[in-house]
Amino acid sequence: MTGPRLTRITGALAEAQPFRGAALYELARVGHRGLLGEVIRLQGDVATLQVYEETSGLEAGEPVTPTGSALTIALGPGLLGSILDGVGRPLTRLAELTGDFITPGAQAPTLDPERAWTFEPLRAVGDTVGGGDVLGTVQEREALVHHVMVPPGVAGRIAALARGEFTVQAEIGRLEDGTPLRLAHAWPVRTPRPVGGRLGDDRPLVTGQRVFDLLFPVAEGGSVAVPGGFGTGKTIIEQSLAKHADADIVVYVGCGERGNEMSEVLHEFPRLADARTGRSIMDRTVMVVNTSNMPVAAREASVYVGVTIAEYYRDMGYRVALLADSLSRWAEALREIASRLGEMPGEEGYPTYLGSRLGRFYERAGRVVALGGPERNGSLTLIAAISPPGGDLSEPVTQASLRVCGGLWALDPRLANQRQFPAVDWETSYSLYAEAVSPWFVQATSPSWPDDRRGLLELLQRGEELREIAGLVGAEALQDADRLVLETSRMIRELVLGQSAYDPNDASSSVAKTHALATAALLLHRRSLAALERGVALTSLPLGALRRALATFRGAAPDVAPERFRDLQQLLDGLLTLGAT
């Protein structure tokens, strides 16, 4: 028999010969079972393939069949609410075909080929269209309209365009040159989708989490690294962002996480209620799931599948949040593949191109003018969790991410052990977007927003310094003013920055409520400090009552927060007269 044959198999890697006329990253069907593989190296007529499925049972001499195309994913109506594996196969459909465990070689299209969608054209016969132009719409979900776009690289005059019920692969029209138009099109996942232009980072992605919105904001189209060890709350943060962040679409990529943790995510996400519509969060979510026991090559591909889907909805003009958990597992897949290829290792065994691969991935985030539509502005905000071994932020994946990310939300296990959630280390974390998005927050709240943010950070920093001193000499040895800083910084940590994901009134905080809490805490400190300067003893200040009033205000529903603020305001006003006589 002619054609390439397997000559060597090493874990997820296989070699085939003779393999002529192939391109790098071309897909192939490997062995008698037709396992999905991808060409990652060519030496003469020998091709090295990474196989996306379990290679147990493969034998030398089995055939390899090139497909002639790279790894692509079908983009069209029906993506929302779906749960895909690392190469874009729907897990629900695979379970129906093969049972609870995926059979090697199983195939299932990303989009349901039998479901019909109602297409409403927005163009007419004779119109000239190009890549990115909107042909019409489909009501994909109750609250979301799917814009059917001309694929990038396609242009011409419309010869036919019909209204009606169509499946994703049925022709809805045709260009004069014969090019068919469909509801869906395929796109290679490793190739960024083109855009019409890039916009500035002057609008924040409001997360509903006070510590992020107030101290470390992320811009729409920005990128943030979220490193944290086991138990620091990465999954809870991502669930909170999926539920409450001001994003139209959420794409969640579970890359190499433990099976029981991914099972919990798959169980919890459909139960999360969208704060805006009251419906399931899955109505505007796409999940790409690849657990740690799945083949390592598919783990490496999963992040590209997720970011390609996110770019597709971004091109429609939607604000998309891509939550990747975690890039450490993705980097470990790169390391394993590189070691099997015999490539020269870099720091801690990672390949020397780790930094450039991460950089290209993060660069796919951004706020853009959509291709073909200057009136359509979309954004892709990338929030990537990282699991550094032992919580060491000096390890290569975290450091490579920090070189290209615009923000760092460092999670501290010490704070998590103190039940401080989100367990964000405000001494290590930072945001390069804070100054750019500050005018937006000023317009949404008041001109004091930048000063209040700086004031809170200064109090927190001074509080940490005094906590270290108090640990050596005891809090009783500190002066009243320093003990006041300790107390108010503790209130800020617990009542302003801390949030409970299980409290319906506190799981999400509006920008106005966040600013009101920050203003109240700063005012409490300033008036208490003024009372001390008038000779009032620290023990005479009503700090306990102030703390309770601030906690009551924090736990109030947004629509009744002003009434709950009244008690706190009366106590604050009392500080003005305390000791005046």
Image (cartoon, rainbow, N blue to C red):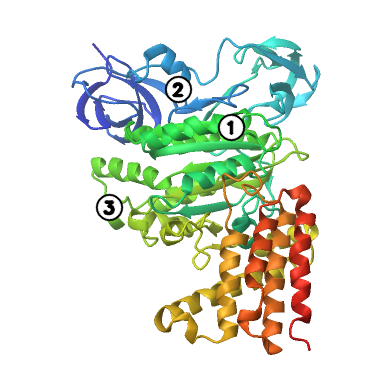
Which residue type does callout 3 highlight? Gly
Sequence-wise, the earlier of marks 1 and 3 is: 1
What residue lies at 37% left-to-right and 44% top-to-bottom?
329
Residue 551 relative to residue 91: left or right:
right
Q: Which mark is residue 285?
A: 1
Q: Are marks 3 and 2 in contact (CB under 8 Å)?
A: no
Using the rendered view, name the quadrant where residue 333 is placed: top left
Q: Nearer the viewer, residue 503 or 309?
A: 503
The number of callouts visible is 3
Using the rendered view, name the quadrant where residue 64 is placed: top left
Residue matched to label 3: 349
- Whole-angstrom CA distance, mark 1 to mark 3, is 35 Å
Q: Secondary structure at mark 3?
A: helix
Q: Secondary structure at mark 2?
A: helix
Residue 486 relative to residue 246: left or right:
left
- Whole-angstrom CA distance, mark 1 to mark 2, is 15 Å
Sequence-wise, the earlier of marks 3 and 2 is: 2
Residue matched to label 2: 91
